[in-house]
Image (spheres, grey):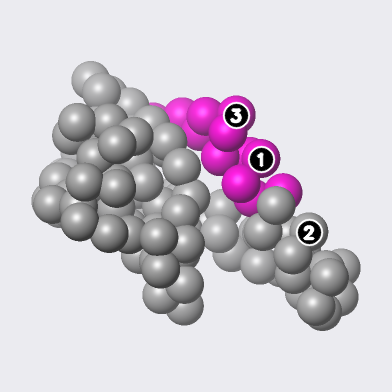
Amino acid sequence: MKEYKVRILDTVFADIDDIADFIVSISTLEHAAKYARELGAEIMTLRYLADFIPESRYRSVRHYHPHAKQLRTHNKQLNIIFHIEDDYVIVDKILASKMIIN
């Protein structure tokens, strides 16, 4: 099993900030921080899982990269959009599941 290095684009950090801001608006800062940490941990699982996830068939996902893949988060509300380039998993976007369309 290959282990990849994970590179997260700046736009993904902005996505995480937006998600945390939304959680703060309906809950607490502690809840938002916990959710952001868990999301970061899920992103890091791509070091090992990336090869096992097939390329997405959805046009809305492939919009970010022609060979984009998607990892659905544990709560099924978000998708981590990424692609593989050499020894790197490059995380392109975090997208709400309801935004995944064909």
Instruction: Look at the image and say whether residue 11 sits in the magenta stretch.
Output: yes
Q: Are marks 3 and 1 in contact (CB under 8 Å)?
A: yes
Image: magenta residue range: 5-17
Mark 1 is surrounded, within 10 Å at the Cα level, by few (under 14), some (14 to 19) or many (20 or more) other residues, namely few
Q: Quadrant of the N terminus?
A: top left
Looking at the image, is 20 positioned above or below residue 61?
A: below
- Measure how far apart labels 3 and 1 are at the Cα level: 7 Å
User: Is residue 79 found left or right of 50 in the rendered image?
Assistant: right
Q: Mark 2 highlights which residue?
A: 21
Q: Which mark is residue 14?
A: 1
* Residue 87: % across, % down: 27, 24
Looking at the image, is 84 positioned above or below residue 27?
A: above
User: Is residue 55 found left or right of 83 in the rendered image?
Assistant: left
Of the numbered discs 2 and 3, the one sitting upstream in the chain is 3
Q: Which mark is residue 10?
A: 3
Which residue does the image show at 34% across and 34% down from the upper left?
Answer: 64
- Measure how far apart labels 2 and 1 are at the Cα level: 10 Å
Tell which residue pokes out farthest to the top in this image: 86
